Image (cartoon, rainbow, N blue to C red):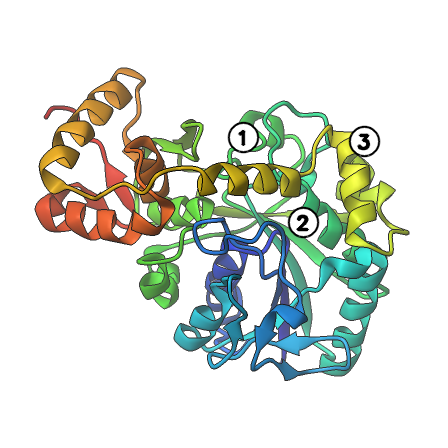
Amino acid sequence: MTRLIVAAGGGGDAVAAAMLAAALYGDDQAVILTYAWDRLLIDPVPGPRGPDDFTGLEPITPAVWQVPAEARPIAPAGSTLPRLAAELPHTFALIDPRQGAEGVTRLLEGLIGYLEPETIDLLDVGGDVLARGDEPTLKSPLADALTLSACGQVNAPIRLLIAGPGLDGELPLDDLRGTLGPLVHTFTPKDVDPITSVLEWHPSEATGMLAATTRGVRGTCEVRDAGLPIPLTDESPTVHEVDLDEALSRNRLARAIMATATLAEVEALSREICGFSEIDYERNKALWLKEQPPTSLDAESLLPALAEFEAEARSRGVTHTTFRHLTEALNLDGTQRDDLRRLLIDSRPEQYRAPLWHITATT
């Protein structure tokens, strides 16, 4: 019996898909179809990677490639997928978006025809796949719209699932409640066990918060370079089903890109409908990062800076943050995230709420 889970936005959605497979199906052999699209601290090349950006891929169908543990991204590109394949038992298959929604649709149809899966789920952590396109908090609609558009054109029963509603910070939970369908599952700490090792290094903030709330963490978590506050509530560890056709009727970008044959066309329509393309944002940020002088991770100066950040965060009502946000807030390079994480956990282990950093009420 084969389970196919499409990770709507790539990145952390692929990690959450592994958790979902174990929780819903007791399955450690799911096929997870995902983008190779990581944050710039992992992959300094803007946008998603295609099969030509890797060595060591293995064909599943003529259009679909598996990313095994032995695969390697071709420098300067980076990818978390080979390490995921090394640490998790699932098959990670690559979404190639370079031929637009038409290409992703053909790819998905071929994979479904080959696997004949028992179930097909389209999984999005947070719920930005349900965006109309004009929301002021929307940051990354392109990948989700592309997978939604393709899934909507495939002649197969696909279930759309939203895990951790509101945790990506793109659509507020209050705005999502009216769109969420029946509760499918509430994650438990046992469900996090299969991905515990991954959470120690994977940079996904939304899936990290999903895991933390599953373990009982509550409060307000500050994320991203802009310091976005995300409520961590009893609704955070839930999974809801949403009617896929209703999601398509809501998502203007997903409908508009159905006939696209290139990623450039998808980007152009994203700029027209949403006012931006997140790949443009990555291009601009990559140029900015190249101009920044390297900084040293000096514990003597770091801890006072951390204390100042925590005091300011407490004044904003923040109780937790991610190590990605801490790295940015302390003016460190993204490559220093892991070193910062180790230093802080070693010096103040009582503040670690895996995989988040707890900002205590008093210093």
Name the residue at the right extreme. 259
- Residue 301, compared with residue 61, is above or below; it is above
Of badges 2 and 1, nearer the viewer stands 2
Quadrant occupied by the C terminus:
top left
Q: What's the residue at 22%, 43% (across, down)?
A: 296
Q: Which amino acid type is shown beneath numbered disc 3?
A: Glu
For label 1, the crowd category at 10 Å Cα-Cα, with few meaning under 14, some 14 to 19 and many 20 or more, is: many
Residue 123, x across and y down, in percent: 61, 55
For label 2, the crowd category at 10 Å Cα-Cα, with few meaning under 14, some 14 to 19 and many 20 or more, is: many
Please state which of residues 328 and 13 is positioned toward the viewer in this rendering: 328
Q: In which quarter of the image is residue 114?
A: bottom right
Quadrant occupied by the N terminus:
bottom right
Residue located beneath label 1 in the image: 173
Residue 46, x across and y down, in percent: 59, 49
Residue located beneath label 3 in the image: 272
Q: What's the residue at 79%, 51% (across, down)?
A: 149
Q: In which quarter of the image is residue 129?
A: top right
- Residue 323, compared with residue 78, is above or below; it is above
Contact flag, marks 2 and 3 (Cβ < 8 Å): no
Query: Which of marks 1 and 3 precedes in the sequence?
Result: 1
Query: Which of marks 3 and 2 precedes in the sequence?
Result: 2
Q: What's the residue at 90%, 51% (across, down)?
A: 259
For label 3, the crowd category at 10 Å Cα-Cα, with few meaning under 14, some 14 to 19 and many 20 or more, is: few
The residues bearing labels 2 and 1 have C-alpha atoms spaced at a distance of 21 Å
Indicate the secondary structure of the residue bearing disc 1.
helix
Name the residue at the top extreme. 315
Please state which of residues 334 and 121 is positioned toward the viewer in this rendering: 334
Query: Which of marks 1 and 2 precedes in the sequence?
Result: 2
Q: Which amino acid type is shown beneath numbered disc 1?
A: Leu
Residue 171, x across and y down, in percent: 59, 31
Contact flag, marks 3 and 1 (Cβ < 8 Å): no
Residue located beneath label 2 in the image: 143
